[in-house]
Image (tube, grey):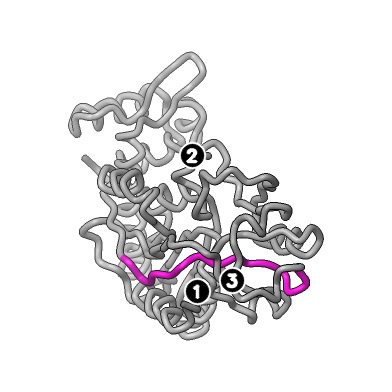
Amino acid sequence: MTLAQLRYAITVAGADSMSEAARNLFISQPSLSASIKELEDEIGIELFRRTNRGISVTPEGEEFIGYARQVVEQYELMESKYINNESVKKKFSVSMQHYTFAVNAFVQMVKQFGMDEYEFAVRETKTYDVIDDVRNFKSEIGILYINDFNRKVLEKMFREYGLEFHEILQCHIYVYMSKGHPLAHKSEITLSELEEFPCLSFDQGSNNSFYFAEEVLSTYEYKRLIKANDRATMLNLMVGLNGYTLCSGIICEDLNGSDYCAIKLKSDEVMTIGYLARKGVAISSLGRKYLEEIGKYQDMILD
């Protein structure tokens, strides 16, 4: 296995065909195909499926490509620093479900480290994509929740993908709504009281299993339900339609403003918010600082 073969595999994974990848690499297609086949024979797995429509990465290939990216990126960092004598920025990326407090923790971490020496990336995205980003080394850390309903399914997935889930905080369920909502004055709300108002849920795309829902009680038969795909739209629907969503109860007024409130839902449900990381891979100093910032929200839980 050579560094060139790893680079070839990464390029093929990002192309629609072997010929396109060969053009991008400035080598002949037969040479590229032979090199990839040699690599597959050496590691004992099929990285790509070849069809009349082109190529696609196999599940085993996805994992291998993730490791390959990490190796190539580390080599390029060393090459830039020690051979080319370039000043290279360290990278940190995190993927998360739609949690304002997770974004705010990212903001605080960036402020402390600054952006002169570091390159940052943050992705608020779908549940499956959070898991897949960490699996394929696109993000060092993934922030999501588990509870009694989705725990077995997600933990099985974590094990299969070589990931570990670490608890950060536990909280009961809160109803997040505009302060102008007719029920905003209450100290506790039942699901039956919410029946006439639209429940807002983040769209999970093709991975729309109940187990991937960002909101607890995903199997409940809501009378009115609206799917959205970003947090700004959610907030607009809360104001415009008296919509609501279910959340941890942690409010970040610095980012969302002071026009929203969280009221405890009458339920025994508990959600555990934590972080995903690759099993056996040490967390970087940036990652540790980010987790430290998120851990501070333990004191803000409304229970």
- 269 displayed left or right of 225: left
User: Looking at the picture, how far across and down is residue 183, in whole percent?
Assistant: 71, 68
For the residue pair 126 and 211, the one nearer the viewer reads as 211
- 122 displayed left or right of 142: right
- Which residue is identified by label 2? 209
User: Looking at the picture, how far across and down is residue 99, in whole percent?
Assistant: 54, 66
Vertical relation: 263 (above or below) 65: below
- 178 displayed left or right of 156: right
Label 1 is placed on what type of residue?
Phe
Element assignment for label 2: loop
Element assignment for label 3: strand
Q: Which of marks 3 and 2 is nearer the N terminus?
A: 3
Query: In the drawing, what numbered circle is on residue 106?
Result: 1
Q: Main secondary structure of the magenta part?
A: strand
Query: In the drawing, what numbered circle is on residue 283?
Result: none
* Residues packed near mark 3 inside 10 Å, few (<14), some (14 to 19) or many (20 plus): some
User: Looking at the picture, how far across and down is residue 66, in whole percent?
Assistant: 34, 47
